[in-house]
Amino acid sequence: MHKVLILFGPPVDQAAFARYFEETHRPILAGLPQLDAIEVNWVAGSVSGDLPVHLLVELLFPTEEALQDGLNSVAGQKMARDYSSFASGGVTILLSNSVPIPTAGNQE
């Protein structure tokens, strides 16, 4: 699975950030072509107590080509431009290739 990981830093106004994300930004993400799923992770805590990330969004694509097509699409460009509208805590975007590793409890 190929992913775009979007890490949002703590915003100045959490309520306004959440409202904008849900009402405006999330629909932009949903319009990315070849997107398999969106996983939204509102960060609730950290083992160190420090919360450098407020929200982690994962965009899942079936292939690297699909990921690149999604990011280079009209919706992908709109997504990139939209961060300046609401991401007051900053944003970091990472690309990853997930490889599942079976655990002892999941081996057959």
Image (cartoon, rainbow, N blue to C red):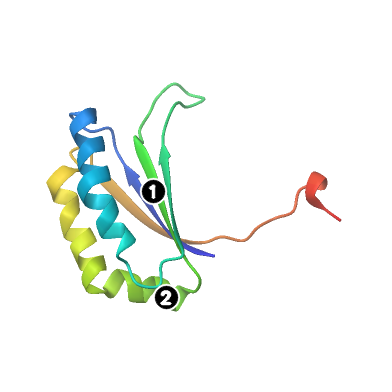
Q: Secondary structure at mark 2?
A: helix
Residue 77, horizontal then vertical, whole percent: 21, 67
Which quadrant would residue 35 be assigned to in this image?
Answer: bottom left
Work out whether residue 20 or residue 49 is closer to the camera in this orientation and state it. 20
**Amino acid type of the residue tagged 1 in the rendering:** Val
Q: Residue at x 20, y 42 (%)?
A: 20
Which quadrant would residue 59 be assigned to in this image?
Answer: bottom left
Q: Residue furthest right?
A: 108
Q: Is residue 73 left or right of residue 96?
A: left
Q: Is residue 70 left or right of residue 62?
A: left
Q: Secondary structure at mark 1?
A: strand
Q: Residue at x 22, y 29 (%)?
A: 15
Residue 13, horizontal then vertical, whole percent: 18, 29
The residue singled out by tag 2 in the image is 66
Q: Residue at x 47, y 27 (%)?
A: 46
Q: Is residue 96 above or below residue 7?
A: below
Q: Is residue 11 above or below residue 98?
A: above
* Mark number displayed over residue 5: none
Could you classify mark 2 by the number of other residues whose Cα lies within 10 Å: few (under 14), some (14-19), or many (20 or more)? Answer: some
**Amino acid type of the residue tagged 2 in the rendering:** Ala
The residue singled out by tag 1 in the image is 57
Q: CA distance from mark 1 to mark 2?
A: 18 Å
Determine contact: label 1, label 2, CB under 8 Å.
no
Residue 67, horizontal then vertical, whole percent: 40, 71
Q: Is residue 76 left or right of residue 33?
A: left
Which of the two labelled residues, at mark 1 and mark 2, occupies the earlier sequence position?
Answer: 1
Could you classify mark 1 by the number of other residues whose Cα lies within 10 Å: few (under 14), some (14-19), or many (20 or more)? Answer: some
